[in-house]
Amino acid sequence: MKVILRAAAGLVALAVLPVWPYGYYLVIRVVVFVVAIYIVVVGKPLASRDRALLGVLAVLFNPVFPVSLTRLVWLPIDLAASFYLWRLSNSPAVLSVPLPKR
C-alpha cells in the first residue's frame, strides 16, 4: 500500500506542471478517488482526522461528478494532497492495510 500511496502522491505532484493533456487529470482523479476510498474502507485503525481528509480528497478528485476549479485553485490543492498522501504512506495504520486479492 505504501507504493500505491506514493505513486498517487507523485501523480498529483506532477499535476502542478501545466504541460499535461486533460486525460492525465482524468487519470489522476480516478487514481486518487479509488485510493482514498479504499483506504477509508479497509484502513480500520485510521484516525478520524485521516478518514475525514481522505473523504475530502475523494470528493475533490471524484471522476463521476468532477469539481471544476481553475488551475490557480487546483495548484495548492494538488500540492497539499500530494504532501498528505506521501505523509500518509509512512503511517503505521496504512502500512497494515492489505492489498486487494485477485
Image (spheres, rainbow, N blue to C red):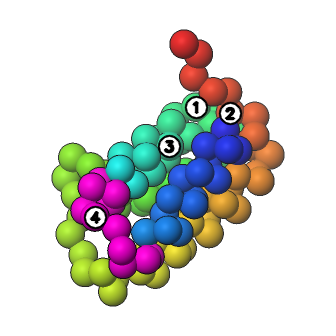
Look at the image and give the residue range highlighted in magenta. 16-26
Q: Is 66 displayed left or right of 71 in the figure? A: left
Badges 2 and 1: C-beta atoms under 8 Å apart? Answer: yes
Say which residue label 4 marks.
21
Q: Is residue 23 magenta?
A: yes
Instruction: State the SS at label 2.
Output: loop
Residue 91: percent from left, percent from top: 76, 51
Q: Name the foreground residue: 20 vs 98.
A: 20
The answer to which of 47 and 56 lies nearer the viewer is 56
Check disc 1 and report its element: helix, strand or loop: helix
Mark 2 vs 1, N-terminal side: 1
Amino acid under disc 3:
Val
In the picture, the quarter occupied by the C terminus is top right
| Identity, as a three-letter code, of the amino acid under mark 4 | Pro
Earlier-in-chain disc, 3 versus 2: 3
Q: Which mark sits nearer the N-terminus, 4 or 2?
A: 4
* Residue placed under numbered mark 1 in the picture: 42
- In the picture, the disc for residue 75 is none
Label 1 amino acid? Answer: Val
**Spatial distance from mark 3 to mark 4, Cα to Cα?**
22 Å
Where residue 72 sits in the image (x, y, percent)? 33, 86
Image: 74 above or below 44: below
Residue on which disc 2 sits: 97
> In 3D space, how far apart are the residues under numbered discs 1 and 3 (Cα atoms)?
10 Å
N-terminal of the two: label 1 or label 4?
A: 4
Residue type highlighted by circle 2: Val
